[in-house]
Amino acid sequence: MAESHRAALQAGAPSTPAAPEQPPLPEENPNRHREYHGWRTMVTALFIVGVAALAISLAVFSGGTPATEGDFGVVELPAYLNPAQRPVEVRAGALAPDLELETLNGERFRLSDWRGHPLVLNFWASWCGPCRRETPVLIRLQDEHRRAGLVVVGVNIEEARGPARGFADEFAINYRLPMDFSGSVTRRYFPGFTGPPRTYFIAPDGSIHEFFVGQASEAEVERATVKLMRLIDGPLGPNVLPGPKALPTNLLSEFHVVGTRVGELAPDFVLPTEGSPARMWRLSDQRGRPLLLIFVEPGCPVCAVDWAIDAATEGGVDAVVITSSGTVAARAGGAPFTELQWETETGSLFAKGNSVQYAVVGADGVLRALSAANGEILRALEALAAEAAVPQATVPEATAPDAPAS
């Protein structure tokens, strides 16, 4: 099925303006038999057979059928990343549907991680002639605008890694290449029956600013990119911006939703560490370690949190203080902790208006406590320490058989 879809997309379409997209027709009921309608049905059947044959030949000569590992596809945008409840659709002005895929290099790519950056999302395939002509333009624009925060992403359409790797090496591509092995992302972003390339220009707020269907001229792509860059106030840098992020798909649980209530998976976030040079710290990267997160509101006049740091350290829990430069977080106890720079959206998500807020997160990523009350936090830390003290079940070692009596 993936190969036939790829073959059907092979006939590229000329560049067209971003006209309003018509919603796709509903899928036909698979249990309902098709009716014969004369020569139109025959022509349609012959066309489908031809497309299938072409798909098979493409699979044979392109290095085999695609693998499916790491292919998560279109994923739900977390509610905390869309507080205004804007529509999520493939049209100008709406939020771009979120996606999570494995890149050609085996890394994880999540579209919503790059919220705040201007982003160019290009769909391509190695067998697509217009894609080959368009790729050098994208490479140049990524080079020119990377330091200012532009992110160029090339989603490969239903190919195996071999052909995609050959294409990337041939052009020395300098941007991320997520692999849409199953074609699920492509089907969402290609609501009409047109071939690649298709390029979306996504604004820093995550909305689709404009898009091109088919190959666009170098001047058109450059014009759209420059307009996109004007939507930011200043240079952002090439790294992921601080703030709340979607929890990686492989860390989700069927038993817990993501949220800020006790018993829910803690929302993910990225924040820079204090000090120079700063590095990016991500909550989901700490999975497997219990944590005490301490949110200290900027400008808090008396924020002595050393007791919490000491209590966490004594119980084998890592303490993390999220504060702003100049805010005093007492360190009298001398226990080690990680200090992160305050970011408003993350603070609002967890702190909920409190000058000091504590969040106890288990090694499984589940919130055990979210409170400003010292006693509640101490009880949660004690419960984590008690869990850690319980010995794991072990299998008794096999014993040698008794020696025969002499």
Image (spheres, helix red, strand yellow):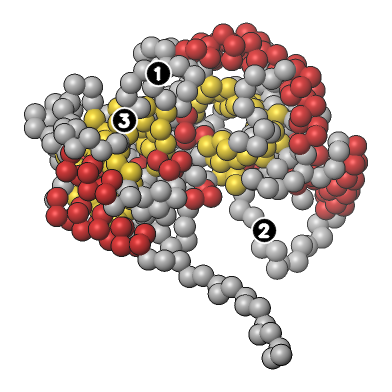
In the picture, measured across the screen, residue 382 lies left or right of residue 38, that is left
Task: Estimate the x, y position of residue 256 in percent, counting from the top left.
Answer: 40, 59
Numbered circles on residues, count: 3
Residue 41 to residue 233: above or below: below
Which residue appears at 49% of the width and 50% of the height?
251
Tell me if 387 is positioned left or right of 61 in this view. left
User: Callout 3: 10 Å neighbours few (<14), some, many (20+)?
Assistant: many
Indicate the position of residue 94 as horizontal and vertical percent values: 45, 34
Residue sitting at the far front: 406
Work out which quarter of the rendered image holds the C terminus and state it: bottom right
Residue 18 can be seen in this image: no
Residue 340, label in figure:
3
Q: Looking at the image, which residue is at 32% across and 24% down?
A: 274
Q: Amino acid at mark 1?
A: Pro
Quarter-of-image position of residue 401: bottom right
Secondary element under disc 1, as helix, strand or loop, is loop
Q: Which mark is residue 28?
A: 2
Left or right of residue 98: residue 366: left
Callout 2 secondary element: loop
The foreground one among 154 and 104 is 104
Mark 3 / mark 2, whichever is N-terminal:
2
Foreground mark, 3 or 2, reads 3
Q: Nearer the viewer, residue 321 or 74?
A: 321
Residue 150 visible, this orientation: yes
Task: Give the residue at x 74% y 46%.
Answer: 67
| Amino acid on which the number 3 mark rests in the picture | Leu
Quick one: SS at disc 3? strand
Question: Is 258 rendered above or below residue 114?
Answer: below
